[in-house]
Image (tube, grey):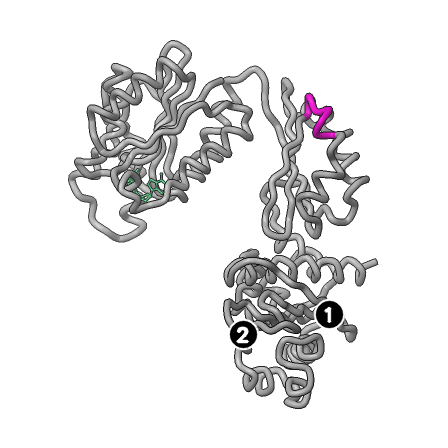
Amino acid sequence: VKVKIVSVGTEILLGNIVNTNAAYLAKQCANLGLSCYEQITVGDNEERLQETIQQGLETADIIILTGGLGPTKDDITKEVAAKVMKYPLKLDEESKENIINYFNLIGKPITENNWKQAMLPEPSHILKNENGTAPGVIMEKNGKYVVLLPGPPEELSVMFEKQVIPFFKSISEEIIYSHMVKICGHGESKVDEEITDLLENQTNPTIAPYAKSGEVHLRVTSKAKNEEEAETLMQPMLLKLKERFGDSIYTMEEHITLEESIVTLIKKNKLSISTVESCTGGLLAARLINVSGVSSVYQLGHITYSEEAKIKAVGVKKETIDTFGVVSEEVAKEMAIGEAKFSNTKIAVSVTGLAGPNGGTKEKPVGLVYIACYICGNVYVKRFIFPGNRIKIRNNAVSSALVFLREKLLQYSK
Ligand code: ATP
């Protein structure tokens, strides 16, 4: 099945917004086993949009368009697509109702042009918009599909995952089913080496690696008649990966993040956590706070950027800083111990490092980071040197702090 992705909007052409929707949709299509042959961006121009859709119908089986479903005059995607398909626009009562409910909820008056969004092609499959007013649409003619999705990424993704994927699954005879095996603490090349034989001999399921900061994800995908059959096909491969990577696999589910798996471990062990950060400036706390429900275990976080703050807030000794330097194993340890004491938590993680670009020396180069992890009376510390610029160093420090914390938590719970 061939797919063409069309991003609509002059803002994208001018570079005012980054086309994240196309990347998102391409990735989703790949996961579904649909081949994305072409991506194109068109401005808010009727003639060029019409031409693009017409060409798409000749070369692709599915055209996915995003953007231009809004209430204003320059939002023309639906009107043009319906014209190409030769389907008239009719008032859809349910969409009208949804628009009324949406405006009641946000307490704003409905303007006349909002009704434009309830005018939908007939026949079509209508996609409800949970986060906005513009409904999405799937039109079909002669076995070809035109899918219209809203521009705002959070509206698009919810609609795609909850409605478009099930729709395509319901019309295809074969389903694509996948697991995401998420590995932390190993570099991309190490993982690649471990699975060379699996990569070389893959058929069904297939396996594809993706590198992320501090993690490598392996998507294992199989094609089958139904989910059960797909799952059975995948099991031997998943087992092999478990044997090879063991505890480094923190999940096999797409939606679970590293921080989420850590919060689950903390909860399981009935522990509590706090953080104290220097060069990462709160990024570690933010990662943990990404997890909903973390409030039952996360107590408090400090950003102790200056030496004075490290001394005042978490009781690092001035002598320790004077003797070993602020970026040192000893200071990292005292930060973690002091934080646990201050917050009265069983776990405390500290980060102190040199994110650069200035201030590096031969002994203490830019990228040098110490991470300490205090767990129930024991404190562990690890030294890292991260390459790259300031943002890369800080992000890597956060990922490594999470991986280190997870490692210590697993040891604790054994
Ligand atoms: P609305 O009802 O909000 O007008 P729409 O479907 O008409 O939605 P657009 O007006 O094209 O969508 O875009 C609305 C906003 O969505 C843009 O300002 C931009 O922030 C975001 N957006 C649109 N297209 C993309 C894209 N391809 N990638 C990322 N963001 C996008």
Return the residue nearer the eye: 377 or 18. Answer: 18
Relative height, residue 253 to residue 344 (above, below): above
Q: Amino acid at mark 2?
A: Gly
Whole-percent x and y of residue 225? Answer: 63, 18
Asked if one can make out residue 308 in the rendered structure from this viewpoint, the answer is yes
Q: Residues within 10 Å of mark 1 (few under 14, many from 20)?
A: some
Return the residue nearer the eye: 362 or 366. Answer: 362
For marks 1 and 2, the one nearer the N-term is 2
The quarter holding residue 385 reads bottom right
Residue at 70% in and 24% down: 202
Stretch of the chain drawn in magenta: 198-205
Q: Residues within 10 Å of mark 2 (few under 14, many from 20)?
A: few
Relative height, residue 79 to residue 99 (above, below): above
Relative height, residue 224 to residue 133 (above, below): above
Residue at 56% in and 83% down: 307
Q: Does dot 1 land on a helix, a strand or a loop? A: strand
Residue at 65% in and 38% down: 218
Relative height, residue 33 to residue 317 (above, below): above
Residue 305 appears left or right of 21: right
Whole-percent x and y of residue 193? Answer: 74, 39
As drawn, the residue found furthest toward the top would be 142
Q: Which residue is mark 2?
A: 359
Return the residue nearer the eye: 283 or 409. Answer: 283
Q: Mark 1 vs mark 2: give the one in front.
A: 2
Return the residue nearer the eye: 133 or 260. Answer: 260
Whole-percent x and y of residue 2? Answer: 46, 19
Q: Amino acid at mark 1?
A: Val
In the image, is residue 245 part of the stretch drawn in magenta? Answer: no
Which quarter holds ligand 1?
A: top left
Q: Which residue is mark 1?
A: 381
